[in-house]
Image: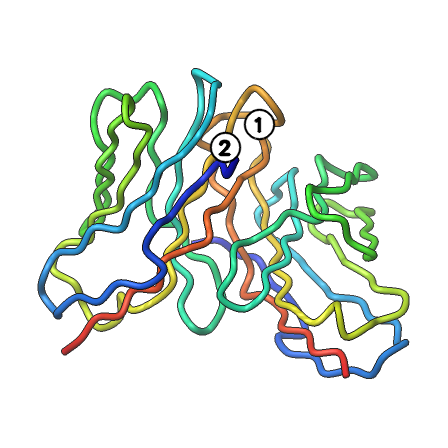
């Protein structure tokens, strides 16, 4: 059972607000990921991290930013939320052993609604 | 071209029956991994089963099995003895080594409904 946590689970916020979505894992995993998922659709990778102080953008362009100052923590920030940011954001982690079968473990997700 | 194709947007099955969810993939990489995840309405992604491209046998995990046909590039998920709790979205995903070996590419998913 994976121990990966996301807060808040649900967020309703007005346009222009700055928001930070929290993601933490207690497994000591090196790799962490952020995915964006619109309702009923596939997941798209927006950010990933190999380890502390390492972050990269994913396949889907996103106006969000991330940081990785501690192994267990990978927050995602939107400086100015817009209605187009309304989506579900899923955080995941994996051990980072570089194996083809390495499983990614997901958090419960944050459902964001920007009015 | 899509790397992962799930052609069934929705599937219905009677409780206690078996169901097959289709997944085809596209890669030129000889080494790759295939994953299935379940996403209930609550939103979390639950890992179900994994199949490596070099694995000789089809993967099984409890009621889940993966029907891996390498030449046809298909990796169908079989759920035996369906339960009401199996109602969820199911996503097929692939990891390729040739690009970045950390990234998963997901299909669009299949919504499974188990009827009592």
Query: Residue B75: percent from the left, percent from the top?
Result: 30, 37
Query: Residue B53: percent from the left, percent from the top?
Result: 36, 23
Q: Earlier in the sequence, mark 2 or mark 1?
A: 2
Residue under numbered circle 1? B101
**Residue neighbourhood size for the residue with mark 1, other residues' Cα within 10 Å, grouped as few (<14), some (14–19), many (≥20):** some
Farthest residue, direction top: B30
The chain letter for the residue carrying disc 2 is: B
Residue B73 image label: none
The chain letter for the residue carrying disc 1 is: B
Query: Residue A2: percent from the left, percent from the top?
Result: 48, 53
Query: Which of these two is toward me, A88 or A54?
Result: A88
Tell me: A29 left or right of A76.
left
Secondary element under disc 1, as helix, strand or loop, is loop
User: Quick one: quadrant of the C terminus of chain B?
Assistant: bottom left
Residue B95 image label: 2
Tell me: B80 left or right of B3.
left
The residue at the point 56 percent across, 60 percent down is A107
**Residue neighbourhood size for the residue with mark 2, other residues' Cα within 10 Å, grouped as few (<14), some (14–19), many (≥20):** many
Q: Do the residues marked 2 and 1 share a common chain?
A: yes
Determine contact: label 2, label 1, CB under 8 Å. Answer: yes
The correct choice, above or below, for B64 with respect to B115 in the image is above
The residue at the point 72 percent across, 64 percent down is A22
The residue at the point 82 percent across, 83 percent down is A14
Farthest residue, direction front: B1
The residue at the point 80 percent across, 67 percent down is A20
Quarter where residue A96 is shown: top right
Quarter where residue B115 is shown: bottom left
């Amino acid at each position: 059972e994976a121990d990966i946590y996301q807060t808040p689970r649900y967020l309703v916020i007005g346009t222009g607000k700055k928001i930070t979505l929290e993601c933490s894992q207690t497994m000591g995993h090196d790799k962490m990921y952020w995915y964006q998922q619109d309702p009923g659709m596939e997941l798209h990778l927006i950010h990933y991290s190999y380890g502390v102080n390492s972050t990269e953008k994913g396949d889907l362009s996103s106006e969000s930013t991330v940081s990785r100052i501690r192994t267990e923590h990978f927050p995602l920030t939107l400086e100015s939320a817009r209605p187009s940011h309304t989506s579900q954001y899923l955080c995941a982690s994996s051990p980072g052993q570089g194996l083809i079968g390495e499983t990614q473990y997901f958090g419960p997700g944050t459902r964001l609604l920007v009015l | 071209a899509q790397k992962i194709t799930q052609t069934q947007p929705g599937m219905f099955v009677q409780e206690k029956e078996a169901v097959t969810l289709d997944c085809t993939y596209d890669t030129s990489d000889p080494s790759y991994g295939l994953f299935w995840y379940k996403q209930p309405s609550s939103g979390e992604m639950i890992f179900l089963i994994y199949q490596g491209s070099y694995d000789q046998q089809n993967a099984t995990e409890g009621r889940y099995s993966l029907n891996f046909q390498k030449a046809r590039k298909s990796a169908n998920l079989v759920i035996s003895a369906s339960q009401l709790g199996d109602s969820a979205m199911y996503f097929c995903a692939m990891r390729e080594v040739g690009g970045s070996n950390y990234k998963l590419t997901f299909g669009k998913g299949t919504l499974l409904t188990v009827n009592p």
